Image (cartoon, rainbow, N blue to C red):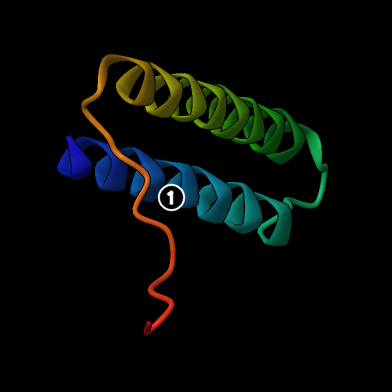
Amino acid sequence: MKIVMVVMLLLVLGALASAGVFMLRRRKDGEGSDRQMARALAVRVGLSIALFLFVMLGWALGWVKPGGLPTGG
């Protein structure tokens, strides 16, 4: 379960990084990179929503339990 969540988080970060690359590598005409950047950001948003729903489903089904921070006492 945790591995799936970490992989999804890495995919979100990868989509964010690719959007940044598309933003920085604009062509002289500027046509293709804007569309690719928008698509990468849309993928990032979709993956983030899917990850959130997956975490909520895992919590509701008892697959993931909140641990909290250790208080030392």
Residue at 78%, 33% in the rendered image = 31
Q: At 47% from the left edge and 42% from the top edge, which residue is drawn? A: 12
Closest to the observer, 54 or 61: 61
Residue 33 in percent (x, y) is at 69, 40
Q: Residue furthest front?
A: 73
Placement of the C terminus among the 4 image quadrants: bottom left
The quarter of the rendered structure image containing the N terminus is top left
In the picture provided, is 17 more to the left or to the right than 26?
Answer: left
Q: Residue 34 or 16: which is nearer the viewer?
A: 16
User: What residue appears at the point 39 percent right and 46 percent down from the top-left corner?
Assistant: 9
**Judging from the image, what secondary structure is the residue with disc 1 in?**
helix
Taking 30 as reference, is 10 left or right? Answer: left
Q: Is residue 56 left or right of residue 4?
A: right
Q: Nearer the viewer, residue 17 or 10?
A: 10
Q: Is residue 57 above or below residue 66?
A: above
* Mark 1 burial class by Cα count in 10 Å: few <14, some 14-19, many 20+: some
Q: Position of residue 50 (x, y in %)?
A: 46, 21
Observer-nearest residue: 9 or 21? 9
Residue 46 place in picture, x, y as percent:
55, 22
Q: Pointer 1: what residue?
A: 14
- x then y, percent, for residue 49: 56, 23
- Return the residue found at the far bottom: 72
Residue at the image position 59 percent from the left and 57 percent from the top = 21
How many badges with numbers are in the image? 1
Which of the 4 image quadrants contains residue 8? top left
Left or right, 21 with respect to 60, comes to right
Q: Amino acid at mark 1?
A: Gly
